[in-house]
Image: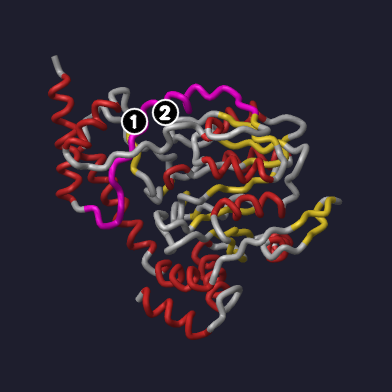
Amino acid sequence: MLLTDCRRVLTSRHYINGTEVACFEEEFASYLGVSGCVGTACGTDALYLALLALGVGPGDEVITVSLTAYPTLLAILRTGAVAVLVDVDDTLTMDPDALIEGITSHTKAIVPVHLYGSPCDMQRICDIAEAHGLIVVEDACQAHGAAIEGRRVGTFGHAAAFSFYPTKNLGAIGDGGMVASSDPQILQRLYRLRSMQSENIDGRQITGYNSRLDELQAAILRSRLKELEKRNLARRKAAAAYNALLPDCLKRPFAPAQALSAVHIYAVRSEQRPAFISTLERGRVPAMIHYPKLAHEYGEGNIRCRDLRISIRVREEILSLPMHPNLQQSSIEYICTLLTEELSHEAP
């Protein structure tokens, strides 16, 4: 199938802004349930251009979290805005109460991050945003197919950014991104901004950026989109198996009520993380930490950190176990046995 997709594009000799991109934008918009989508070169660009299209710039404050991949912060800083970082709650996503405390007269936008594929409390976040006249741009780069009460994430805010990096639930064989929105004015601005054109937004002349999803990646993503729900279901079944077999001392992923995670990453928490990592490594099981640093620790810029006590604690405890659609029950049982045996060795 991959070779067929590539051959179709190469035969067409149309590699930029052609039929494949237009069709994928339409198909992904239909999948999400929004009016339109605009392809970009990567997820970071998608978030950056969405913020630009909504008028975010110097002098503005954008509230987000530090428990996220650094590109979330990078996209905000690139606009010239100040990134205001608030804490997370038990879901490891933005704490709505911390959000309220972070709002000032300079706040322009909120960027909730659906971390590891688990949805934020979007209803409460959007209610807060509406009450304060703020913009909401969802960072859904890890959450393809996640939903809240049957409504897919990426449809709650004014716009949403997605990434198609190869490791994502919906991944290309290179970089790629997408902005989703149901606002025709935002979509029109995005079409122009991604192709180096300028826009007058809120009285400011905004210069566009060269950021386009190419035809090869779009063709591959069109094909893989058809398999996304089946592959997400396999991830959820693997997560359920982990939940049933892991020792009780490990904190499982926790999602809000009525939320359906995309399970991009299956991350547990433990104060005994170093011992568990050593055990997994001895058993030849890959163990990763997402993320060993909070986002604001990776770079400098216009960053303002509020109370991040929970985020800091999570950074010290988080551990990502193997997760992919082809993960076998036997592999999950082996991993859980290793972790259980480590506990028995630790017991007095």
- Seen as rendered, the residue at the extreme right is 203
Tell me residue 251's x, y (percent).
32, 31
Where is the N terminus found, in terms of image quarters? bottom left
Quadrant position of residue 6: bottom left
Q: Residue at x 21, y 36 (%)?
A: 280
Q: Residue at x 50, y 39 (%)?
A: 68
As rendered, which of 157 and 66 lies closer to the eye?
66
Q: Is residue 33 highlighted in magenta?
A: no
Residue 115 placement, left or right of 240: right
Q: Is residue 312 highlighted in magenta?
A: yes
Disc 1, SS: strand
Q: Which residue is mark 2?
A: 314
Q: Amino acid at mark 1?
A: Arg
Question: Can residue 268 be seen by looking at this rendering?
Answer: yes
- Seen as rendered, the residue at the extreme bottom is 11
Q: Is residue 108 above or below residue 30?
A: above
Q: Residue at x 55, y 72 (%)?
A: 21
Residue 340 placement, left or right of 251: left
Tell me residue 90's x, y (percent).
43, 31
Count numbered badges in the picture.
2
Q: CB of mark 2 within 8 Å of CB of mark 1?
A: yes
Disc 2, SS: helix
Q: CA distance from mark 2 to mark 1?
A: 7 Å
Where is the C terminus found, in terms of image quarters? top left
User: Which portion, as a residue range, is magenta?
Assistant: 304-327
Q: Which residue is mark 1?
A: 269
